[in-house]
Image (cartoon, grey):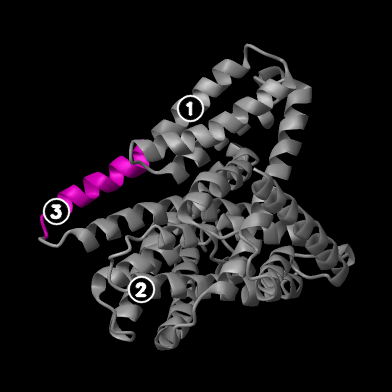
């Protein structure tokens, strides 16, 4: 108990110091955390904290996804639902296929391993993107496009990963194409249904109280409960918690007072509570990414595949973003070229990719290489793209230089 408390306090202390230092140096907070984590691992090999699949899935992802979804207005989402849905579904599938093709043809990986890697690395990560936009004060349609697409393509990537894993383990080829499509529908629709049910139950319970503490507790139960319930019945936990957040946010936190199931004080308290919960989870995951990258055993034979994976991830994102966005050019959903540049270069990878990689069975061929390369791609994404995103946003006019701190 004392050791766990010490580690929590250590994470908070480091997060505060990095936040102050990043603000003073005008650097992205997430990049500072990764660098700080690597420095801690280099000087304190016995730091004790490490990233695991369970830690990311059960502790870190639910609050981050819920906080992002609960503040996303349905009216805003509906306004750009067509491009968001296309980028999150078809875009993610195409990106995964392109990455898998590169790893198969150029790196010589077997197709099952390449498909698994393509599925887990294709989705952009809302954790990294939301933190970056908050750091730079990006608001409006651009933020809505990037955040909403990253939320939903996480769900799409999680479904693709389950299918790729089933393919990799289906040695005899017993599964038909119909079985695969039925599984995709079951996992995706099932996750949304679980999220709807949990959100509805939480709203019904909240209507019976006006105590802000109880209202906040109900949102926490809903966030973690939807995720765990969905995983228990083998459907998408990511889609479940996103659906729960959208329902509870739009019917309560973001609704007009007379139509909200929450008291005024409860709404204010809950928003502040989830902002802090997301900040803490955010700090923990990026700090531990740095710690884990520094602790990883160097795999010299995987250096070439790592370079290929980085290039393939960027190229696949470009190949999906620009053509799909251009399809909306003559419509009311037009995405400007500047917004397309941000959608491409802002496609950071993060916690979900790591969680999926760490979930791979120990006996899977190339499992250790996939984990190593995933950490490498995520580290490059956060540091290289994260450091240059503020400059790109300023260059494209999305951040007013007068607003810099």
Please state which of the two labelled residues, at mark 1 or mark 2, is closer to the viewer.
1
Q: Secondary structure at mark 1?
A: helix
Label count reads 3
Q: Which residue is mark 2?
A: 98
Q: In the picture, residue 303 is in which quadrant? A: bottom left
- Image-quadrant location for residue 379: bottom right
Bounds of the magenta segment: 173-190
Residue identified by numbered label 3 = 175
Magenta segment: does it hold 45?
Answer: no
> Picture quarter containing residue 163?
bottom left
The reply to whether discs 3 and 2 touch (Cβ–Cβ < 8 Å) is no
Q: Is residue 33 above or below residue 54?
A: below
Left or right? Give the position of 363 relative to 359.
left
How far apart marks 3 and 2 lie (CA) works out to: 23 Å
Left or right of 133 on screen, residue 404: right
Res 213 visible = yes
- Which badge, 1 or 2, comes first in the chain's sequence? 2
Q: State how far apart marks 1 and 2 are (Cα).
A: 36 Å
Q: Give residue 293's position: percent from left, percent from top.
A: 57, 72
Is 66 drawn above or below residue 342 in the view shown?
above
Badge 3 marks a residue whose secondary structure is loop
Residue 198 is tagged as: 1
- The first of marks 3 and 2 along the sequence is 2
How far is the residue under mark 1 from the one under mark 3?
A: 32 Å
Residue 400 in sight from this viewpoint: no
Residue 187 part of the magenta segment: yes
């Amino acid at each position: 108990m004392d050791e766990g408390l010490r580690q929590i306090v250590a994470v908070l202390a480091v997060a505060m110091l990095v936040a102050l230092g990043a603000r003073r140096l005008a650097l992205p907070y997430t990049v500072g955390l990764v660098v700080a984590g690597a420095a801690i691992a280099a000087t304190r090999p016995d730091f004790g904290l490490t990233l695991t699949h369970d830690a990311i899935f059960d502790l870190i992802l639910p609050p981050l996804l819920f906080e992002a979804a609960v503040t996303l207005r349905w009216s805003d989402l509906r306004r750009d639902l067509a491009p968001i849905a296309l980028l999150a579904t078809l875009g993610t599938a195409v990106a995964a296929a392109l990455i898998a093709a590169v790893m198969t043809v150029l790196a010589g990986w077997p197709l099952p391993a390449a498909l698994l890697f393509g599925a887990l690395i294709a989705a952009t990560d809302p954790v990294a993107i939301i933190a970056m936009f908050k750091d730079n004060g990006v608001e409006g349609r651009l933020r809505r496009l990037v955040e909403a697409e990253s939320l939903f393509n996480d769900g799409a990537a999680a479904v693709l990963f389950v299918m790729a894993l089933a393919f990799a383990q289906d040695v005899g080829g017993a599964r038909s194409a119909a079985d695969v499509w039925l599984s995709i529908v079951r996992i995706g629709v099932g996750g949304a249904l679980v999220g709807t049910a949990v959100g509805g139950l939480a709203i019904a319970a909240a209507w019976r109280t006006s105590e802000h503490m109880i209202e906040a507790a109900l949102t926490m139960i809903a966030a973690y409960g939807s995720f765990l319930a969905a995983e228990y019945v083998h459907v998408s936990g990511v889609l479940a918690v996103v659906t729960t957040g959208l329902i509870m946010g739009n019917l309560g936190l973001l609704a007009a007072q007379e139509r909200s199931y929450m008291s005024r004080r409860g709404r204010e308290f809950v928003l502040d509570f989830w902002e802090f919960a997301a900040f803490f989870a955010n700090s923990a995951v990026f700090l531990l990414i740095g710690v884990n990258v520094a602790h990883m055993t160097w795999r010299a034979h995987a250096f070439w595949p790592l370079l290929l994976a980085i290039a393939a991830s960027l190229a696949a994102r470009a190949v999906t973003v620009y053509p799909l966005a251009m399809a909306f050019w003559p419509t009311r959903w037009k995405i400007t070229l500047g917004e397309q540049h941000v959608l491409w270069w802002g496609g950071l990878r993060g916690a979900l990719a790591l969680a999926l990689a760490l979930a791979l069975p120990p006996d899977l061929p190339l499992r250790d290489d996939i984990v190593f390369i995933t950490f490498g791609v995520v580290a490059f994404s956060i540091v290289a793209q994260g450091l240059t995103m503020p400059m790109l946003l300023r260059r494209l006019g999305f951040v007013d230089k007068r607003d810099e701190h």
